[in-house]
Amino acid sequence: METIKIRSFQESDFQAVQEMNAKEGWSNLVDKNEETLCAWLNSEPALVALDEGRVIGYLRGLTDGTTTLYICELLVREEYRNKGIADQLVALAHECYPSTRVEMLATGSSQGYYEKQGYRAFYGFRKAAEEV
């Protein structure tokens, strides 16, 4: 994986991010294209993993800088999974805010991955904006 590079998100990466979201079935992010772009532009950390210039993974997070680093989305293209790319993205995000705890939501299919990485389950509640 010597060709994999991780850098900050740039607006020119957004189309590739949305293509990955669509392929993963994350239709809410795809359908709300403008809102999703706004979220990316206002998120920190916002990282992409590249293989020879092609976006093959990403992490979008939010943090207060001292207590919590919340990973909003973490996705790696299927053909690049199980190569440590997601771990590299999380590690780099956490290096920027080393005193923070890391929290993230998982889908049913990714829950086992996070448990193997030593993450503990936590529980919360959610309402969509239109439900409030």
Image (cartoon, grey):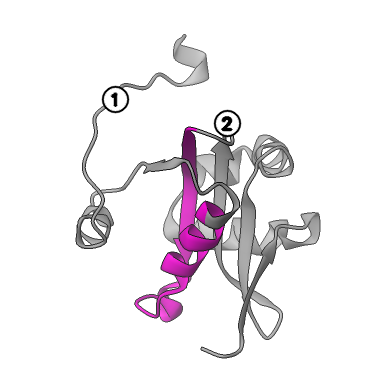
Secondary structure of the residue carrying tag 1 is loop
Q: Closest to the observer: 32 or 81? A: 81
Other-residue count near label 2 (Cα within 10 Å), few / some / many at <14 / 14–19 / ≥20:
few
Q: Which residues are magenta?
A: 67-94
Whether residue 88 appears in magenta in the rendering, the answer is yes
Can you give x and y, in whole percent of width and height, for residue 65 in the image? Answer: 59, 36
Q: Amino acid at mark 2?
A: Asp
Q: Name the residue carrying label 1.
A: 124
Secondary structure of the residue carrying tag 2 is loop
The residue sitting at 55% across, 61% down in the picture is 92
First in sequence: mark 1 or mark 2? 2
Q: Quadrant of residue 117?
A: bottom left
Whether residue 117 appears in magenta in the rendering, the answer is no
Residue 64: assigned label: 2
Q: Closest to the observer: 27 or 57? A: 57
Horizontal side of residue 123 vs 105, given as left or right: left
Q: Closest to the observer: 64 or 82? A: 64
Q: Closest to the observer: 132 or 61? A: 61
Horizontal side of residue 73 vs 31, given as left or right: left
Q: Image height check: is 82 above or below 95?
A: below
Residue 44: assigned label: none
The residue sitting at 51% across, 49% down in the picture is 98
